[in-house]
Image (spheres, helix red, strand yellow):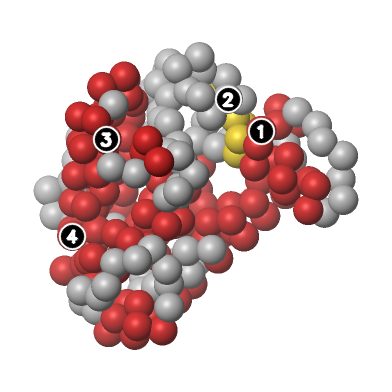
């Protein structure tokens, strides 16, 4: 797949402008938080403004640079690249790369180096994809056990993950999967590794 063909799947789960009181990430628009938007505009010498005013061109550029390229999705085999990209967006680049490393049998350190690249290019995606998605599910479960207040987000996380499983062709997930956010549902994005140790279960 490519960034352009992968982005629509991610955006189905990110919704429009939200400022959910249970989400300490604060105001978010199309999955881009105010903090990320502020950093992006500062990087390019632009004044800060509300993420409510996020432009589609800015949104796409942020997703491509901060997640697709940062997680090296362009170096990952077809379908596995979508899994890594969506996980990087929802759970952070470090976790996405770590799950990928675990699913292809190399050392797990969250950094995409030469050994990871070799393992990824030689792997069998049909074997790696279920392992990757199972690792993501296990992380959600462990996180909710450690922080029960996050249980409000578990249904949305699992809907998104099972839709991903269906999209990449994992058997058993081809029917009955919610394809996007249902009214009133928020799918919380997790801080990346090291950003908030409370989430590094």
Location of residue 117 with respect to 135 vertically, above or below: below
Residues at marks 3 and 2, CA–CA distance in whole angstroms: 20 Å
Do residues under tags 1 and 2 come within 8 Å of each other at their CB atoms?
A: yes
Residues at marks 3 and 1, CA–CA distance in whole angstroms: 24 Å
Labelled disc at residue 34? 1
Q: Residues within 10 Å of mark 4 (few under 14, many from 20)?
A: some
Labelled disc at residue 131? 4
126 left or right of 41? left
In the rendered image, residue 42, in percent from the top left (x then y), is placed at 80, 47
Foreground label between 3 and 1:
3
Say which label, 3 or 1, has the lower sequence index: 1
Say which label, 1 or 2, has the lower sequence index: 2
Do residues under tags 3 and 4 come within 8 Å of each other at their CB atoms?
A: no
Say which label, 3 or 2, has the lower sequence index: 2
Location of residue 134 with respect to 113 vertically, above or below: above
Location of residue 58 with respect to 182 vertically, above or below: below
Labelled disc at residue 183? none
Residues at marks 4 and 1, CA–CA distance in whole angstroms: 33 Å
SS of the residue under disc 3: helix
Residues at marks 1 and 2, CA–CA distance in whole angstroms: 7 Å
Please count the marks in the image: 4
Q: Residue at 37% of width from left, 57% of height from top?
A: 96
Labelled disc at residue 143? 3
Furthest-front residue in this view: 197
In the rendered image, residue 4, in percent from the top left (x then y), is placed at 55, 60
Q: Residue at 50% of width from left, 14% of height from top?
A: 21
**3 or 99: nearer the viewer:** 99
Say which label, 3 or 4, has the lower sequence index: 4
Residues at marks 3 and 4, CA–CA distance in whole angstroms: 18 Å
122 left or right of 53? left
SS of the residue under disc 2: loop
């Amino acid at each position: 797949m490519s960034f352009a063909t992968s982005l629509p799947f991610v955006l189905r789960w990110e919704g429009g402008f939200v400022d959910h009181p249970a989400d300490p990430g604060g105001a978010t628009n199309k999955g881009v938080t105010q903090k990320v938007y502020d950093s992006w505009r500062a990087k390019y010498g632009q004044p800060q403004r509300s993420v409510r005013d996020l432009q589609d061109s800015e949104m796409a550029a942020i997703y491509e640079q901060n997640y697709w390229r940062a997680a090296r999705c362009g170096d990952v085999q077809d379908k596995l690249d979508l899994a890594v990209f969506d996980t990087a967006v929802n759970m952070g680049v470090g976790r996405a790369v770590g799950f990928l490393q675990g699913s292809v049998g190399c050392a797990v350190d969250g950094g995409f180096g030469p050994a990871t690249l070799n393992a990824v290019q030689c792997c069998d995606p049909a074997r790696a994809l279920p392992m990757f998605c199972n690792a993501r599910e296990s992380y959600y479960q462990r996180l909710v056990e450690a922080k029960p207040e996050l249980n409000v987000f578990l249904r949305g996380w699992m809907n998104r993950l099972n839709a991903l499983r269906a999209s990449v062709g994992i058997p058993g997930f081809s029917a009955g999967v919610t394809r996007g956010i249902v009214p009133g549902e928020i799918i919380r994005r997790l801080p990346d590794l090291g950003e908030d140790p409370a989430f590094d279960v």
